[in-house]
Image (cartoon, rainbow, N blue to C red):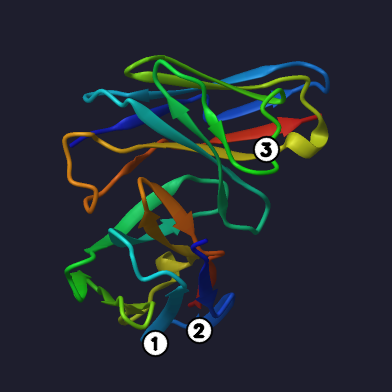
Amino acid sequence: GAVVSQHPSRVICKSGTSVKIECRSLDFQATTMFWYRQFPKKSLMLMATSNEGSKATYEQGVEKDKFLINHASLTLSTLTVTSAHPEDSSFYICSAPDPHRAMNTEAFFGQGTRLTVV
Amino acid sequence: KQEVTQIPAALSVPEGENLVLNCSFTDSAIYNLQWFRQDPGKGLTSLLLIQSSQREQTSGRLNASLDKSSGRSTLYIAASQPGDSATYLCAVVDGQNFVFGPGTRLSVLP
């Protein structure tokens, strides 16, 4: 079946540095990918929708200059956390719907990235 | 705006018990509802997917039902085991993206 691969699974960085997280669709082309964030003991919240060939759509309250999203190709979306601070520490996960599947079938999630900013 | 809630927030049961996790959503215009399991610090494991035209799905000891008109889904776990301990998330597909509930943290005690 279709697989979404996310990398890295875990990253620790210093405050002020930038971190890039990659999300790849391995056997299908994803014109759209979704980025979610999970705060400790909270549910996953949609951050932004990544669109190949156009700007990402950010949810209300998400800083677009802080969380840069680039949908570089039909199989790759990247999320860059710029000038990271400890409050950016979180679990980030991407998702991609297979465009060849009906909307009422399963979508696919990456394995998630645990970001810790020290 | 779609909102998903889950009850209870946490549950602790002895091994062997049958249990029910509840999920409610406010907008019945969904494409599907999916139950996930999340282990601490890990990603999501899909458990069951119920399409909008279906009323229930079963996989092993798990059974999920969907009542779109009332905006409810339940996940039934039979003969619970310590290995079932995890957070269980329900999510509805609203458009193309998911709207997640806050989860139920389940602890099954040996």
Q: Quadrant of the C terminus of chain A?
A: top right
Which amino acid, mark 1? Glu
Q: Position of residue A76 (x, y in %)?
A: 39, 18
Query: In which quadrant is the N terminus of chain A drawn?
Result: top left
Q: Residue A15 vs residue A68: left or right?
A: right
Task: For the residues labelled 3 and 1, say whether their Cβ atoms are less than 8 Å apart.
Answer: no
Residue A87: image quadrant is: top right
Q: Is residue A105 above or below residue A58?
A: below
Q: Which mark is residue B55?
A: none
- Which residue bears the numbered disc 1? B17
Q: Is residue A34 above or below residue A74?
A: below
**Residue B13: numbered disc:** 2
For discs 2 and 3, the disc positioned in front in the rendered view: 3
Residue sitting at 52 percent across and 61 percent down?
Answer: B1
The residue labelled by disc 3 is A62
Q: How crowded is the residue under tag 1: few (<14 C-alpha within 10 Å), some, or many (20+)?
A: few
Classify residue B18 as left or right of residue A9: left
